[in-house]
Image (cartoon, rainbow, N blue to C red):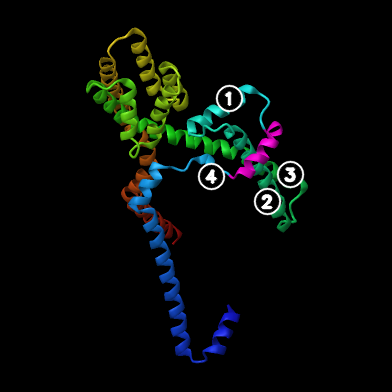
């Protein structure tokens, strides 16, 4: 800072001119910052760009460099767990999160290994500025960093699964109502699913992709029942599992699809109403803790505080009187 002030004094000796220069630089920086934020906002809010992004969304696998995937595949036998059940569980969680690539499991464990190694190295380098740490403390922090690197991706994956399932759950009522309307209008099940997928492309893109995959698998030669069961395995939602079970039974026994969907839609509305009533009934219990921790202390402070102060004042007067 002193060097900048000396440089400014050498070029602009007048104090008034120095103030103008500083104000001008500050105004220029603020102007550039505002223009940058405005340009970023314009790009993000551009309707044409948003529509193009929705029509051709970027897949998560495309964001991973190919070289990284190649290195991870070479070290896959050292990174992947030996238990088949653990690999299947991880693969199922990745599918629930929307990562359906063949290398998703390998990349996930590669990220865990790289993150754990990176945090361990960063911890060792950071301890060079803390020479008072003992070897035991250093080992503890290194193990803690490795544990964070191993457990961190699991936490992120669990969050992604919950968020995607919540998005699917939010779009399922609209999809079910539209499916009932399309089937009652005379469309077949395959055409109805495709129409619903097209209509939900912008409002609920995750569910639209899943429904489009059902039609893609059916057109590729897979049986419709198997394609519907794959939908259940990809989403992991009980609501979708119930709908798929009803549709499979309907297709197997030849009953009316429209009647089946209408009955399930009514049952699903009742289920949503019961869920809403359950959440509303829990509000009273959940409000106990905020009331006890936030409202009651302030209430007692306002209501009982003056009385306590008065008692303390009286006791102090009595003490002074006795002392005399």
The residue located at (66%, 47%) in the rendering is 119
Residue 166, picture quadrant: top left
Looking at this view, is 156 or 91 the one in front?
A: 91
Asked if residue 51 can be seen in this view, the reply is yes
Q: Is residue 239 left or right of residue 125?
A: left
Q: Is residue 312 left or right of residue 81?
A: left
Label pair 1/4, CB-CB below 8 angstroms: no
**Mark 3 closeness class: few <14, some 14–19, many ≥20 residues within 10 Å:** some
> If the image is split into quadrants, where does the C terminus sit?
bottom left
- Dot 2 falls on a residue whose secondary structure is helix
Q: Nearer the viewer, mark 1 or mark 2?
A: 1
Label the magenta part by its dominant secondary structure. helix
Q: Earlier in the sequence, mark 1 or mark 2?
A: 1
In space, the residues marked 1 and 2 are separated at their CA atoms by 32 Å
Q: Nearer the viewer, mark 3 or mark 2?
A: 2
Looking at this view, is 282 or 68 the one in front?
A: 68
Q: Earlier in the sequence, mark 4 or mark 3?
A: 4
Q: Position of residue 286 (x, y in %)?
A: 37, 34
- Name the residue tied to disc 4: 63
Q: Position of residue 320 (x, y in %)?
A: 42, 60
Q: Nearer the viewer, mark 1 or mark 4?
A: 4
Looking at this view, is 185 or 6 the one in front?
A: 185
- Name the residue tied to disc 1: 88
- Name the residue tied to disc 3: 139
Q: Earlier in the sequence, mark 3 or mark 1?
A: 1
The residue located at (47%, 23%) in the rendering is 233
Q: Earlier in the sequence, mark 3 or mark 2?
A: 2
- Name the residue tied to disc 2: 122
In space, the residues marked 4 and 3 are separated at their CA atoms by 35 Å
For the record, the magenta segment spans 65-79
Label pair 2/4, CB-CB below 8 angstroms: no
């Amino acid at each position: 800072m002193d060097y900048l002030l000396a440089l400014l004094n050498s070029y602009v000796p007048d104090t008034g001119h120095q103030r103008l220069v500083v104000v001008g630089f500050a105004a220029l920086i603020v102007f550039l910052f505002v223009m940058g934020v405005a340009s970023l906002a314009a790009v993000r809010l551009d309707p044409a760009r948003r529509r193009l992004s929705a029509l051709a969304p970027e897949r998560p696998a495309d964001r991973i460099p190919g070289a990284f995937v190649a290195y991870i595949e070479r070290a896959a036998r050292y990174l992947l767990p030996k238990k088949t059940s653990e690999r299947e569980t991880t693969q199922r969680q990745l599918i629930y999160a929307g990562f359906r690539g063949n290398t998703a499991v390998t990349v996930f464990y590669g990220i865990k290994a790289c993150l754990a190694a990176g945090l361990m190295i960063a911890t060792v380098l950071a301890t060079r500025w803390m020479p008072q740490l003992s070897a035991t403390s250093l080992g503890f922090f290194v193990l803690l960093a490795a544990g964070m690197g191993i457990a961190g991706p699991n936490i992120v994956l669990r969050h992604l699964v919950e968020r995607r399932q919540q998005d699917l759950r939010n779009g399922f009522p609209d999809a079910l109502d539209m499916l009932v309307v399309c089937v009652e209008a005379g469309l077949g099940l395959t055409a109805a699913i495709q129409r619903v997928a097209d209509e939900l492309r912008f409002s609920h893109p995750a569910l639209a992709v899943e429904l489009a995959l059902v039609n893609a698998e059916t057109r590729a030669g897979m049986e419709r029942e198997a394609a519907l069961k794959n939908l259940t395995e990809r989403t992991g939602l009980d609501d979708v599992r119930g709908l798929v079970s009803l549709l499979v039974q309907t297709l197997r026994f030849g009953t009316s699809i429209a009647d089946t969907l209408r009955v399930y839609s009514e049952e699903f509305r009742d289920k949503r109403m019961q869920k809403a009533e359950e959440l509303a009934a829990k509000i009273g219990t959940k409000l106990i803790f905020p009331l006890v921790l936030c409202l009651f202390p302030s209430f007692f402070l306002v209501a009982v505080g003056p009385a306590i102060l008065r008692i303390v004042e009286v006791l102090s007067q009595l003490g002074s009187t006795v002392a005399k």
